Image (spheres, rainbow, N blue to C red):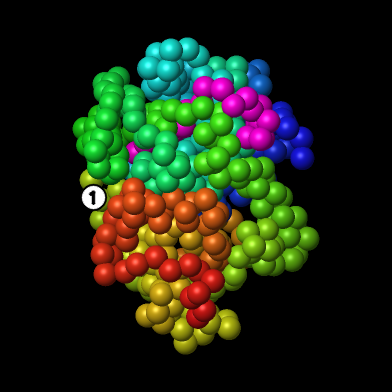
């Protein structure tokens, strides 16, 4: 693999396909990512992606992304927001504050998560800053809360966390005793400030990044997307193609028969029930979603629990589904796969046990069990 690659127009669709699948229902809609990436080409800005192994140990690195509820973001005008970013880009402001804290300009930015919006928006940020983006992220998936990362289990502080909302308000969370505090403050600011904002967090050195990052997830997303597109265009099963690239298991295919949803403290919360079809006829699946799929139960038994991944796909096309587009009657294929070992280690650390707790998605009665131990 090359240490660095330059994003081409032909990378856009495979990348967005894979990012949306890895987003596990969240991470932002690919429609946003598509417009953001095409805008970068239209403006003549070059997007470079670098393998984390190739960066200097003393490099200044930070993470970050767009913060907001997927449901609020989905009703915004994409064109108007992206156009307004040419003059007033919230992420540039947030990362500018971080650079001041670090005493110099950033060398790299690592995406907080892989998703249809939050990865392309960091690609755009890095193109504007003229620096390479890290081929990796903090999770290898998307997640609803800022403290749910591999970084937190590798002694990398979430704070300071600069945050700028859509109205121009800016705050910095300088310290948090509880790992969930910064995210909770951020969610309050976002809900008061137009439902959308940008943050920067987890300042670190290149050496720390190389020990903690979930590596090469951006190029993985591109490979997953390419496999799905090739299967779709050749008449092969795109769900099988995605499962193979994910090294995962096709858990279930069925139709949504019921969903209960509500908006709460900056999150889109949903419980979804599906009736099986085909080889899963007569079986049932239940999903607990907090922006992303956090829990999958098959016939009432635990099948996958966060931070392991449940990817939702359209059974016919293999397209990744967003949690906000789920409706009664929607057909869904579920792929389960293990998260990266670094994320598991982080989740089992003292900080991680609080940060990743099933209580964060309304199930304090449950404990994490690896997907490979849960055969259904």
**In this view of the protein, can residue 29 be seen by the observer?**
no
> What residue do we see at 36% from left, 41% from top?
146
**In this view of the protein, can residue 373 be seen by the observer?**
yes
Please state if 133 lies on the left or on the right of 76 as rendered.
right
Image quarter of the N terminus: top right
> What residue do we see at 40% from left, 20% from top?
98
Q: Position of residue 320 (x, y in %)?
A: 55, 55
Residue placed under numbered mark 1 in the picture: 264
Residue 54 part of the magenta segment: yes
The part of the chain drawn in magenta is 48-68
Q: Position of residue 330 (x, y in %)?
A: 46, 66
Q: Position of residue 195 (x, y in %)?
A: 30, 35
> What residue do we see at 78% from left, 60% from top?
234
> What residue do we see at 47% from left, 29% from top?
204
Number of marks in the rendered image: 1
Q: Secondary structure at mark 1?
A: strand
Residue toward you, 9 or 373:
373
The crowding category of the residue bearing disc 1, from other C-alpha atoms within 10 Å (few below 14, some 14 to 19, many at least 20), is: few
Q: Can you say whether 346 is above or below 358 in the image? A: above
């Amino acid at each position: 693999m090359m240490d660095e690659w330059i994003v081409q127009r032909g990378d856009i669709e495979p990348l967005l396909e894979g990012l949306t699948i890895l987003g596990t229902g969240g991470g932002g809609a690919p429609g946003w990512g598509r417009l953001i990436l095409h805008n970068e080409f239209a403006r003549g800005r070059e997007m470079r992606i670098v393998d984390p192994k190739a960066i200097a140990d003393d490099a200044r690195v930070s993470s970050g992304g767009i913060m907001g509820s997927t449901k609020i973001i989905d009703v915004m005008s994409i064109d108007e927001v992206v156009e307004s970013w040419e003059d007033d880009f919230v992420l540039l402001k947030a990362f500018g504050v971080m650079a001041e804290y670090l005493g110099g300009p950033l060398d790299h930015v690592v995406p907080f998560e892989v998703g249809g919006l939050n990865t392309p928006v960091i690609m755009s940020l890095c193109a504007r800053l003229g620096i390479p983006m890290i081929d990796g992220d903090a999770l290898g998936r998307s997640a609803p809360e800022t403290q749910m990362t591999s970084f937190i289990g590798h002694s990398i502080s979430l704070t300071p966390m600069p945050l700028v909302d859509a109205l121009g308000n800016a705050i910095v969370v300088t310290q948090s005793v509880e790992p969930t505090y910064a995210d909770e403050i951020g969610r309050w600011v976002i809900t008061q400030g137009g439902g959308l904002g940008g943050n920067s967090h987890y300042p670190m050195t290149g050496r720390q990044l190389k020990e903690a990052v979930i590596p090469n997830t951006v190029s993985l997303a591109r490979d997953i997307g390419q496999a799905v597109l090739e299967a779709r265009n050749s008449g092969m099963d795109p769900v099988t193609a995605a499962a193979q690239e994910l090294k995962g298991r096709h858990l279930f295919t069925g139709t949504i028969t019921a969903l209960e949803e509500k908006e709460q403290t900056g999150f889109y919360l949903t419980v979804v029930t599906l009736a099986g079809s085909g080889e899963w006829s007569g079986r049932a699946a239940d999903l607990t979603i907090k922006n992303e799929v956090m829990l999958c139960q098959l016939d009432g038994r635990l099948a996958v629990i966060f931070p392991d991944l449940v990817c939702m796909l359209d059974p016919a096309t293999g397209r990744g589904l967003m949690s906000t587009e789920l409706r009664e009657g929607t057909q869904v294929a579920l792929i389960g796969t293990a998260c990266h070992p670094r994320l598991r280690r982080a989740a089992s650390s003292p900080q991680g046990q609080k940060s990743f707790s099933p209580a964060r998605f309304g199930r304090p009665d449950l404990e994490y069990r690896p997907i490979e131990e849960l055969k259904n």
